[in-house]
């Protein structure tokens, strides 16, 4: 998983990164954005445009946000509340639109 969006994005969702991503791999949940690890090409274009510095390579995620590395993967591989199947790798966020739900970690996270 090349890039991960951490807790700093919760309740911010600026979406500058979405516009910058050349492969459309950043998906919109309810409270946070998620990078699809199967679609990300590890180009890093999203990282410098994030106004809250919520994006980093998975191996550089601060210790206090390490749980978001695995949680980012779960967003795509597990069935989210109100959905019938995992999101998987549909080939771009624009194809599916805003997801509108989050993983339990993000949904239950205290407000920012």
Image (spheres, grey):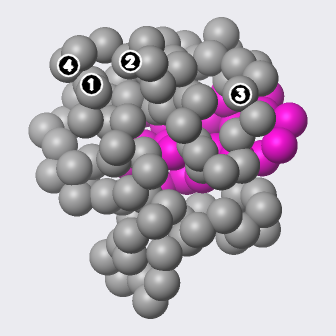
Select label 3 or label 4 by which is in front: 3
**Would you say residue 99 sits in the magenta stretch?**
no
Q: Are marks 1 and 4 in contact (CB under 8 Å)?
A: yes
* Above-or-below relation of 97 to 108: below
Q: CA distance from mark 1 to mark 4?
A: 4 Å
Q: Position of residue 46 (x, y in %)?
A: 68, 23
Q: Which quadrant: the N terminus?
A: top right
- 11 up-or-down from 112: above or below: below
> Residue beneath label 4, please?
64
How many residues crowd around disc 3 within 10 Å: few (fewer than 14), some, or many (20 or more)? Answer: few
Task: Give the crowd class for mark 2: few <14, some 14-19, many >=20 residues within 10 Å.
Answer: some
Q: Are marks 1 and 3 in contact (CB under 8 Å)?
A: no
Magenta residues, start to end: 11-34
Which residue is label 2 attached to? 61
Distance from the alpha carbon under mark 3 to that under mark 4: 23 Å
Specify whether 53 is left or right of 103.
right
- Relative horizontal placement of residue 51, taking residue 22 as reference (left or right): left
Tell me, yes or no, whether the two marked residues, 2 and 3, touch with CB atoms within 8 Å.
no
- Kindly tell me whether residue 9 is visible in this rendering: no
Q: Earlier in the sequence, mark 2 or mark 3?
A: 3
Which residue is located at x 19 percent, y 36 percent?
A: 111
Secondary structure beneath dot 3 equals loop
Local secondary structure at mark 2:
loop
Q: In the drawing, does residue 105 fall left or right of residue 78?
A: left
Question: For mark 3, what is the residue?
Answer: 42
Please name the residue that numbered disc 1 is placed on: 65
């Amino acid at each position: 998983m090349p890039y991960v969006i951490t807790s700093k994005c919760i309740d911010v969702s600026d979406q500058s990164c979405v516009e910058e991503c050349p492969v459309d791999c950043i998906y919109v949940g309810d409270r946070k954005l998620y990078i699809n690890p199967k679609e990300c090409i590890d180009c890093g274009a999203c990282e410098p445009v994030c106004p809250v510095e919520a994006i980093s390579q998975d191996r550089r995620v601060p210790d206090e946000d390490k749980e978001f590395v695995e949680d980012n993967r779960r967003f795509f591989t597990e069935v989210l509340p109100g959905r019938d199947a995992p999101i998987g790798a549909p080939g771009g966020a624009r194809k599916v639109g805003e997801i509108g739900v989050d993983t339990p970690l993000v949904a239950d996270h205290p407000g920012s």
